[in-house]
């Protein structure tokens, strides 16, 4: 993806993939994992509630995913919006601090992880915890306007006629700026439900000259289109025409659809039992996915199973070379 102008942005991902042996493992569900640890996320802020009430738990879940072998961890900002925080009575400034905190927590988890790798000596794979010094990226998560609304439109992509491109850009602008300057390595636009929102993100990345790369990840419930019914191909082409986008994929989508969806977009990709999930992953790799991970209800154990399966495969491949 991209052209000459995108060399710097695309090099972040290509350098990462090169150093990671050609593929990267993304973490699994964050919100659902926080819930599994007892957090009550029944709130319009969903996982972002923990940025206020239990940041330590967020850090711990990031660390669990790193110790399960994830190479990319996504921040707790999915449903963290300035508008959502303000609705809780926080100031604009306080809201921005919370957005920054989401990235800081992931970076801290990475630091702790690296420290553990040094202390416990890297022994690769085989123990309970995977402690292996490797490139780790922090992806600042951005959920959709529908996620903020928390009314189900995140999975219908139907915002009604009153919501225009301008509305969406105004909604997301400041949040994206803050996350881009927070120390994250890239922005992960997740669960994008329609073309209009993809367009809004692409325009913001360009107009505001966002300095870190981004990926677009759509959700689908039919294996062909994004949830709104907009064509995945058209959505992916918006990503293609934006030089700041370094990967396109799908998340929060039934795994049985993902093989076909990758064939459709031929870029990045990202729940079922851990075994079932893993059985899909090699096939996704075979058809060209460079980035694989989980979403809601996947856990550090899912990621560990993926890590093991893929590292076995790449060891087998390199012994043939
Ligand atoms: C509804 S998709 C949620 C994605 C987010 N990164 C999470 O795992 O919490
Ligand atoms: Zn999800």
Image: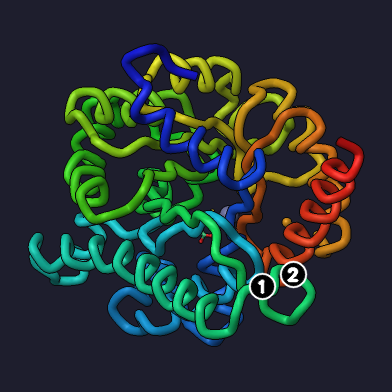
Q: 318 or 279: which is nearer to us? A: 318
- The picture places residue 224, in percent across and down from the top left corner, at 70, 25
Q: Which mark is residue 130?
A: 1
Instruction: Give the label on residue 125, or none.
Output: 2
Residue 134, percent across and down?
Answer: 55, 59
Residue drawn 31% across the image and 27% down it = 200
Residue 319 x %, y %: 88, 45
User: Can you tell which quarter of the image residue 69 is in?
Assistant: bottom right
Q: CA separation, marks 2 and 1?
A: 6 Å
From this viewpoint, is residue 298 visible?
yes
Above or below, 194 relative to 316 = above
Task: Name the residue at 85% across, 48% down.
Answer: 313
Left or right: 145, with 25 as reference point: left
Seen at 51% across and 75% down, the residue is 63
Q: Secondary structure at mark 1?
A: loop
Disc 2, disc 1: CB below 8 Å? yes
Q: Mark 2 or mark 1: which comes first in sequence?
A: 2
| Residue 277 in view, yes or no | no
Residue situated in front as seen by the camera: 214 or 83: 214
């Amino acid at each position: 993806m991209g052209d000459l102008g995108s060399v710097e942005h695309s090099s972040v991902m290509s350098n990462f993939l090169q150093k990671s042996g050609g593929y990267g493992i993304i973490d699994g569900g964050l919100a659902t994992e926080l819930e599994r640890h007892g957090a009550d996320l029944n709130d319009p802020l969903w996982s972002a509630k923990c940025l206020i009430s239990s940041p330590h738990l967020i850090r711990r879940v990031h660390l669990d995913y790193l110790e399960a072998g994830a190479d990319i961890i996504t921040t707790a900002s999915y449903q963290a919006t300035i508008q959502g925080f303000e609705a809780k009575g926080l100031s604009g400034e306080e809201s921005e601090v919370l957005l920054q905190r989401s990235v800081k927590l992931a970076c801290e988890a990475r630091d702790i992880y690296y420290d553990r790798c040094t202390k416990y000596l890297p022994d690769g794979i085989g123990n309970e915890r995977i402690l292996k010094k490797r490139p780790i990226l922090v992806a600042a998560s951005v959920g959709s306007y529908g996620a903020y609304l928390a009314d189900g439109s995140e999975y219908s992509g139907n915002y009604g006629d009153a919501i225009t491109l301008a509305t969406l850009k105004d909604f997301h602008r400041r949040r994206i700026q803050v996350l881009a300057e927070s120390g994250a390595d890239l922005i992960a636009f997740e669960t994008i439900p329609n073309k209009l929102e993809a367009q809004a993100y692409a325009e913001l990345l360009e107009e505001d000259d966002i300095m870190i790369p981004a990926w677009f990840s759509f959700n689908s419930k039919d294996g062909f289109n994004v949830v709104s019914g907009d064509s995945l191909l058209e959505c992916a082409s918006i990503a293609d025409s934006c030089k700041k986008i370094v990967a396109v994929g799908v998340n929060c989508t039934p795994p049985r659809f993902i093989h076909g969806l990758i064939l459709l977009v031929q870029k990045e990709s990202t729940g079922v039992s851990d075994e079932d999930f893993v059985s899909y992953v090699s096939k996704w790799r075979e058809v060209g996915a460079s980035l694989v991970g989980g979403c809601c209800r996947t856990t550090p154990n899912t990621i560990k199973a993926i890590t093991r399966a893929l590292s076995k495969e790449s060891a087998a491949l390199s012994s043939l070379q």
